[in-house]
Amino acid sequence: MSNPSILILAGDGIGPEVMGEVKKIITWYGDKRDLAFDVSEDLVGGCAYDKYGTPLHDDTMAKAQDVDAVLLGAVGGPQYDNLDFSVKPERGLLRLRKEMDLFSNLRPAQCFDALADFSSLKKDVVAGLDIMIVRELTSGIYFGEPRGIIEEGNERVGINTQRYTESEIARVARSAFELARKRGNKVCSMEKANVMESGILWRQVVTEVHDAEYPDVELSHMYADAGAMQLCRWPKQFDVIVTDNLFGDLLSDAAAMLTGSLGMLPSASLGAPMANGRPKALYEPVHGSAPDIAGQGKANPIACILSFAMALRYSFDQGAEADRLEQAVEKVLADGVRTADLLGPEGGVPVSTSEMGDKIIAALDASL
Ligand code: NAD
């Protein structure tokens, strides 16, 4: 049987630096766990524009469709700010998400004990927190028609349309229920069924999918505004939250920040299963290309490394190895190893990007 395939698109700014540490870890899995991957690399974002005049070449797009998982670093930078909208670095990423039809965006909010002081909430509210927000990513108000700014009488009117089909709701609901079965077996669905018809349909379809296919999973419903309050009051009540594109955008950012630094936040975007049963998948840190620290060895590689842990779990069915990698990160943090972004007001001596990667590999070695 051939090895699982990975396409690495490191991108711009700190993307190649943090991805460099992921490449070391991929090599470690081949050498030490007999888990080899066929890795190819290509360009996305500003670096692709510089070489090809487009932020994502058609050949790269075709490769992304063909592999088991895409790992992306970050795109963008000030030198590309004045480019035409159609060739901006972010367009490369949007094209990947759209053409791979990645409808289910997974954003974990996990608080490592060693970093609990970084949260703006009290330590006992966030310590040990481990929730997953599943956001619908390819439909809803960001895509619905009609949209635009029109003239009406003597003033302008801005219009966007919230629109969801039954099948769009059902597929993201399935994604959330499947995930819940691999975690705490609880799903909370959030919408505004009190004021929006699309919310009423959302609640109905999620309930139907649950009753027919996932009766073993505990399902609850919450209005999204109440959900936002509950996330700040007592986030540990949640396991998996499933919600639409707009509410998910807000709730996942809020939940992620409960846990501290941007340099720690991974994400996965999943689509429909391919012929081999694996979902189409793209894994990327939540942060951007951080031009202010690019090229200085200061970037925290953990968000990118934890994104690879998500790939191990969701694309390669290697949950135990994903646990091993997450525990290695936890161990290194517990030992007090910090990149500059993780130093609190008390200061300390930061490690570099590659030193952090090496410490995590040492912790992986120690786990054997
Ligand atoms: P950013 O996430 O790049 O940086 C915000 C701040 O967080 C900066 O001070 C940065 O130094 C810091 N930071 C981010 N990641 C870090 C890490 N791993 N380790 C240590 N510090 C880290 O956001 P921004 O400054 O708003 O955007 C910079 C560029 O990135 C822009 O061109 C933007 O369009 C692009 N961007 C890309 C993505 C993506 O590729 N998915 C996401 C957001 C922004």
Image (tube, rainbow, N blue to C red):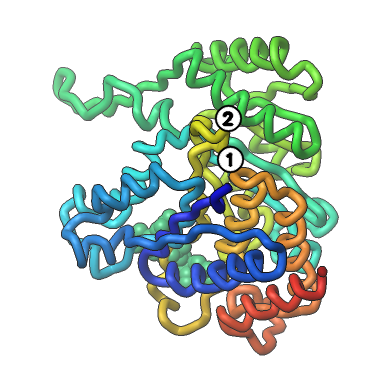
- Classify mark 1: residues with Cα within 10 Å, few (<14), some (14-19) or many (20+): many
Name the mark on residue 251.
1
* Left or right: 280 in relation to 317: left
Ligand 1 under 8 Å from disc 1 Cβ: no
Q: Does residue 137 appear to the left or right of 267 in the view shown?
A: left
Quarter where residue 345 is shown = bottom right
Q: Position of residue 303 (x, y in %)?
A: 58, 62
Kind of residue sitting beneath label 2: Thr
Q: Residue furthest right?
A: 124
Q: Identify the amino acid type marked 1.
A: Leu
- Quarter of the image for residue 152 reads top left
Vertical order, 224 against 112 (above or below): above
In front: label 2 or label 1: 2
Question: Which labelled disc corresponds to residue 168?
Answer: none
Furthest-front residue in view? 1
Which residue is located at x 67 percent, y 53 percent? 258
The residue sitting at 62% across, 47% down in the picture is: 316
| Spatial separation of the CA atoms under disc 2 and disc 1 | 9 Å
